[in-house]
Image (cartoon, rainbow, N blue to C red):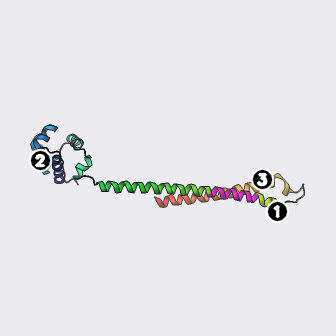
Amino acid sequence: MIDQIKIGGFLRELRKEKKLTQEELAEKFGVSSRSVSRWENGNTLPELGVLVELADYYEVDIREIIDGERKSEIMEKETKETLRKVADYAELDKKLVVKRKCIVTFLGTVVFALSIAAGCILFPQLPEDSILRTDSLWMGIGITGLVMLWAVIINENRKNRQKEKQDN
């Protein structure tokens, strides 16, 4: 709710900071000194166009006039600091996600390489005509490794979606 008396007091304070009389301010904005008096006593508020001009003249934000007080510099610093911390947190979280994806990719590659190595170790001396010596064996081993990699990636994506739901 708008507090006209508080706004009026703030307008008076701003005028006095500029060392102006009500008459001088009225002349600058093309209104009567009686209008300025009514604003400052909280009886009426300036029209929107005049309000914008007042904010510009006094070098304050319109919200400050409507709130009837200056924004605290301490509050602005605290807000900026909080935003900076949120940005840092988001950057850290992003780095962790990238790190997890790198680990998952590395583990998937290791699983794939181990599945091929296991095939070589388990079946090193099979006869040439054995079904286990054919290209289809190696293709099967490769596909198995890819399926395992795919399963790890799917699981990681599921974890990320759950984390996003928790964050929201």
Q: Is residue 19 above or below residue 150?
A: above
Count of residue discs: 3
Comes first in the chain, label 2 or label 3: 2
The amino acid beneath tag 3 is: Met
| Residue 56 x %, y % | 24, 41
Q: Amino acid at mark 2?
A: Arg
> Which residue carries the number 3 mark?
139
Q: Which secondary structure lies at badge 3?
A: helix
| Displayed quadrant of residue 146 | bottom right
The one nearer the camera, 92 or 129, is 92
Question: Which of the two marks, 3 or 1, is nearer to us in this view?
Answer: 1
Q: Which mark is residue 122?
A: 1
Image location (x, y in percent) of residue 32: 10, 40
- Is residue 111 inside the magenta stretch? yes
Q: Quadrant of the N terminus?
A: bottom left
Percent coordinates x, y for residue 99 in the rendering? 58, 56
- Magenta stretch, overall SS: helix
Bin the neighbour count of mark 2 within 10 Å (Cα to Cα): few under 14, some 14-19, many 20 and up: some
Q: Residue at x 66, y 59 (%)?
A: 107
User: Crowding at label 3, few (<14), some or many (≥20) Cα neighbours within 10 Å?
Assistant: few
Chain-order first, disc 1 or disc 2: 2
Segment tinted magenta in the rendering: 103-115
